[in-house]
Amino acid sequence: MNRDTMLQKLQSHEGIWDVLVIGGGATGLGIAVDAAARGYKTLLLEQHDFAKGTSSRSTKLVHGGVRYLQQGDISLVLEALKERGLMIKNAPHLVSNQAFVIPNYSWWDGPFYQLGLKIYDFMSGDLGIGSSKRLSIVETIRHIPTIDQKELAGGVVYFDGQFDDARMAISLAKTAAQFDGVLLNYMKVERIIKNEEGIVQGVIALDLETHKKYHIQSKVVINATGVFADAVIKMDDPSAKEMIQPSQGTHIVLDPSFLPDKYAIMVPHTKDGRVLFAVPWLNKVIVGTTDTIVEKPLLEPHFQLDEVEFILETASQYLTKKPTKKDILSIFSGLRPLAKPEGNKQTTKEISRHHKVMISTSGLITVIGGKWTTYRKMAEDTVDQAMLIGQLKVSPCTTHNLPIFGYDESLNLTEDTLAVYGIEKQALLDLEDEIPVYGGLISESLPLKASQVIWAVRHEMARTLEDMLARRVRGLFLDVNESLRIAPQVAQIMASELNESTDWIVNQLTEFKAIAKHYQLIEH
Ligand SMILES: Cc1cc2nc3c(=O)[nH]c(=O)nc-3n(C[C@H](O)[C@H](O)[C@H](O)COP(=O)(O)OP(=O)(O)OC[C@H]3O[C@@H](n4cnc5c(N)ncnc54)[C@H](O)[C@@H]3O)c2cc1C
């Protein structure tokens, strides 16, 4: 997958596209896979990099959502558990099984959560990934040696999936490309084109690398821009009411000594009524999340200090080794769409995690809500609608059993950080011999090899230092200072692969340092 080739395909394309997707997050990429696999001529345009938005900032869980079970949203949990099973089946190299312990500090918590989680297991049906179990105090401590033992009454262990969200996004892009889908990053949709009857006919998009504009015609245009959906809806109808109020969720990243074993902790009810997770991920520990209303959607949302303090304080209630600000390796924030309050009502409520496919009078299709775990079903429902709106040749969805690019059952993310490359892993390792000039290991702690950098430039459309260190590998999310340390070496390799100058390296380093500030706690 290479941007120049993709651009050539866009330029040489004759006739009208069947499906044009705006937005290259989980939702848009899933739609591109579904549409391309049905045989539709599919184009996806992303204004920044694939998964730059919310889709690289999740808690990294492929889950039914124990929280939604608590809220009694049975149909959502059933749908998500089914999708969890399909995601593990179709992408075993990208999704792994993760055990969670709910620690109990009062005698009735044990039976209460055990019953709930038995229902959760039962709802997974044939696609279950392990049975939940009540734990004694001793077993709970054995699973989580760093758990706070004061008044500990036991625990319950249950299972969900875990993944690397930005790597899944790249694999979805590659899956769509396998079916001749054309996907472009750094291509911003600026306008929607309509015919004389006011029916959507395509878009005008700007290539942010060359500043060239493209007038592109498509039978169907799909708005899959997540928390940015209102802006695209307004391109279609400037008088449309805004629907989305963004709310920020922040995570902090700690070193594995805080949670040294493979088990994660799930706190079902924090002081503010949320769920808090502490999850081992890529040899670090992710702790979060929060729910903080923010004014407008930003591509690079910045955490608030009180969010970080809340996470540290809550985590400290459950861990023997209390994390402090000094222990934080990185902080990342993502935006979820809440429904904007109507009229003079001041309260927001979450747009249901049930996704919603909406069709405007001009034929623009907008899909909002959902979660990473349900991306496939969201895509199926959206493309079913697109087939009708665009009067496309009837073609059923094929993604239930469609292996995601790189499919390899023998690889497992928890044991091997290169598992995400799937069947391409060996080709990537072979690069090490081919180009010894770059040296092998760039960072031991992340870890990062020179071959991964070259691979991402050649085959994964990494265009900037940030694409590389934030999403193709997860350095920025895992350890900001280590990422800043290796940035000059990585930029050098990228420049040589992209045939770029020393000026490019200087610019990239300046931009990367500016972005890194969003992941760093700098106290004065
Ligand atoms: C804190 C947090 C934790 C979460 N954890 C989980 C989890 O553990 N498991 C789970 O299943 N779900 C989780 N979710 C939900 C999940 O992350 C989201 O549902 C999903 O990532 C949304 O994807 P999206 O494609 O709709 O939006 P996005 O990922 O935001 O993608 C929208 C894209 O549209 C692009 N775009 C916008 N305007 C334009 C334009 N004009 N032209 C071209 N492109 C444009 C943006 O650049 C962006 O890349 C979490 C969400 C949050 C906020």
Image (cartoon, rainbow, N blue to C red):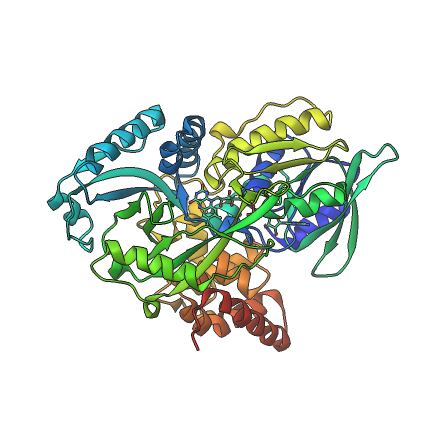
Place residue 65 in its image quadrant.
top left
Which residue does the image show at 72% across and 35% down from the upper left?
364
Whether residue 13 is visible: no
Q: Is residue 118 left or right of residue 307?
A: left
Which residue does the image show at 36% across and 28% down from the upper left?
127
Residue that lies at the very extreme toward the right in this rendered image: 196
Which residue does the image show at 28% across and 48% down from the upper left?
264
Q: Is residue 46 left or right of residue 165?
A: right
Which residue does the image show at 28% across and 59% down from the upper left?
256
On screen, 262 above or below 135?
below
Position in image of residue 167 (x %, y %): 47, 50
Position in image of residue 395 (x %, y %): 63, 23
Instruction: In this rendered view, identify the residue nearer to me: 90 or 189.
Output: 189
Number of numbered discs visible in the structure rendering: 0
On screen, 492 above or below 222?
below
Residue that lies at the very extreme toward the left in this rendered image: 138
Whether residue 410 is visible: yes
Quadrant including the C terminus: bottom left
Instruction: In this rendered view, identify the residue nearer to me: 7 or 472.
Output: 472
Position in image of residue 504 (x %, y %): 62, 73
Position in image of residue 262 (x %, y %): 25, 49
Instruction: In this rendered view, identify the residue nearer to me: 455 or 156.
Output: 156
